[in-house]
Image (spheres, rainbow, N blue to C red):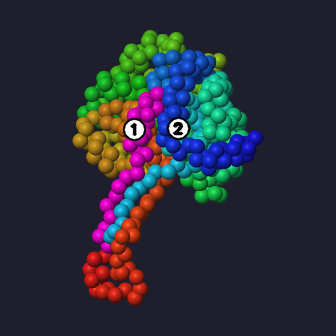
Amino acid sequence: MISKIIESQRAYFHSGATLDISFRLGMLKKLQAALEKWEKPLTDALWTDLHKSYQEAYLTELSIVKGEVKNHLRHLRNWAKPKRRPTPIKMFPSRSRIVSEPLGNTLIMAPWNYPVQLLLNPLVGAISAGCTAVLKPSPYVPTVSAVLEQMITDTFDPHYVAIVQGNRDVNQALLAQRFDLIFFTGSPSLGKLVMEAASKYLTPVILELGGKSPCIVDRQADIKTAAKRIAWGKTLNSGQTCIAPDYLLIHEEVKEPFIEAFAKAVKELHGSDIAKSKHYVRMVNDRAFERVKGYLAEGDIRYGGRAHAAERFIEPTLLDTRINLADPTADEQAGAKGVLTEEIFGPVFPMLTFNNLDEVQGYITRREKPLAFYYFGNEAAGLDLIHCTSSGGACINDTIMHIANEHIPFGGVGNSGMGGYHGEESFRVFSHRRSVVLTGTWIDLPFRYMPYRMFGLVKKIV
C-alpha cells in the first residue's frame, strides 16, 4: 500500500500538475477551508486524547496553521518569482537568477504533543513549494489521528496528499522508501534513526527535535512577571512541548521569592486547584506518567508534587536539586540525576542555583545545544549570554513566543535538530534554489576560449 501511494504521488508530481502557482494557491485555500470545516472535530479530539481545552487547542494548534496558510496565500507569488542576482563582468553578456523549484515527493512525520499543528504546518510549506506529501500522524493520539485522516481524505486526492496510520513498523516501512525530503518532528534519538534511513538515498532531512532548554532567572529579573511567563510556558500542554523550559537556573538571591511568585502564578492561571482546571493537559499515556512522576524523587519538592495515576495528572512541581553551579562537582551531581540529563517533557521543573552568569554559560555550553533558551533579567546581559551560547531559538524575558512569529524561522541546531521553517522559510525548505545563467548570443567574446589570447588582460579582469 505504501509503495503504491508513493508511486502514484511520484507520477503525479512528474506530470507537472503541482508546478503552477495558481494550483498551489488553490490547494492552500482548500486546506484553509478544511481547517474551518474540521475545527470542532479536531478540538474535540484534542480534548479526548490530551485533555486540551478548546482555547488552548485553538491558540497552540489551529490558529498557528491558519496563520501560516494566510501568510503563504499573501506572499507565495512573490516568493516563487525568479530572483535576479548580480553577474560579474567576466561573464558578459550573461545574466543570473535563482529559480525555486519543488523538491518533489515528501514525507512529513509528526509527534503526538501538538498533533495538528506539527503535521499540518509543514504541509503548508509542501503545498506552497509545489510538492506532494505523505503524512504520518502519531498513534499515541488515536482520536486526533483518525480525525486528521478524515480531514485529509475529504480534502485532497491521495496522489497529491495522502495520510498513513500505524506504529513503528509503518514508520520503518515509510523510511525504507525513497523520498525527496523527509520532515520529522520528534526526539533526538528517533531523529538519528530517520537521518540514518535517509542516508541510503541521500535524502535531505529537516529534523525538529528537542532537548533540555534552559531557563535562566537572574537577580535583575522582574520576579512576578518572570514567574507568570515561566509558569505559563511550563504548564502549557502540561510541559509536553519541545520548547518548554526544561530546567531552571536561578540566581541564589531570588530563589525564594521566585518559588513564592511561581506558586501564585500557577493559581492565577489555573485556579486554586489545578487538577480541576479545564486548561491543564494530562500526560499522554501511562508510560509518560510513570516516567515523569519518577523525577519527583530526585530532589526536594518546593511546590506541587501531586500525581494521580488514574487521570495521568501531575501537578506543576518546582524541584530543588540542591545543586549550586559554583560547586566544582555540579556537573557530576547533575549527571547522576535523570531529571537533569533526560528531556523531561512534563511539568516537573528542576532548579539549580548560580552566583554569576559565567557559571551559567559554562554549564550550558558543556551540554548539547538545546532547542530553546530563555533568560529573564537585564536585556543586555541576556544578549551577551545568547552571544556566548547556542540554541535553536531564544527569548529574553519570555518563553515559547518565538514560535508564534511566522516571519522568523523555527528550528533546532546540533542535537536539537537541523533546518528551520515557518513563513518563507517553509517555502524554501521544500524547494530547491536552482541557479540559472542566461547568456546572450549576440556577442561571443573570445577570451575564455583556447588558446587563451590576451591572457594578461583576462587575468586582471577575473
Side of 376 where 151 appears, left or right? right
First of labels 1, 2 by sequence position? 2
Picture residue at 25% right of the left edge, 33% below the top: 220
Which residue is at the far right?
A: 1
Which residue is at the front of the view, 194 or 453? 453
| Picture quadrant where residue 114 is located | top right
Picture residue at 43% right of the left edge, 34% below the top: 73
What residue lies at 31% left-to-right and 36% top-to-bottom? 396
Question: Where on the picture, by quarter, is residue 289?
Answer: top right
Residue 401 screen position, x and y as percent: 38, 32
Q: Is residue 455 magenta?
A: no
Disc sitting over residue 155 in the figure: none
Q: Amino acid at mark 2?
A: Phe
Q: Against 433, is 297 above or below?
A: above
Q: Residue at x 50, y 51 (%)?
A: 101
Q: Position of residue 445 (x, y in %)?
A: 34, 77
The mark total stands at 2
Mark 1 vs mark 2, CA separation in Å: 15 Å
Query: What's drawn in magenta, residue-wise?
Result: 64-91
**Is residue 261 at all visible to an observer of this figure?**
yes
- Rendered view: 39 above or below 331: above
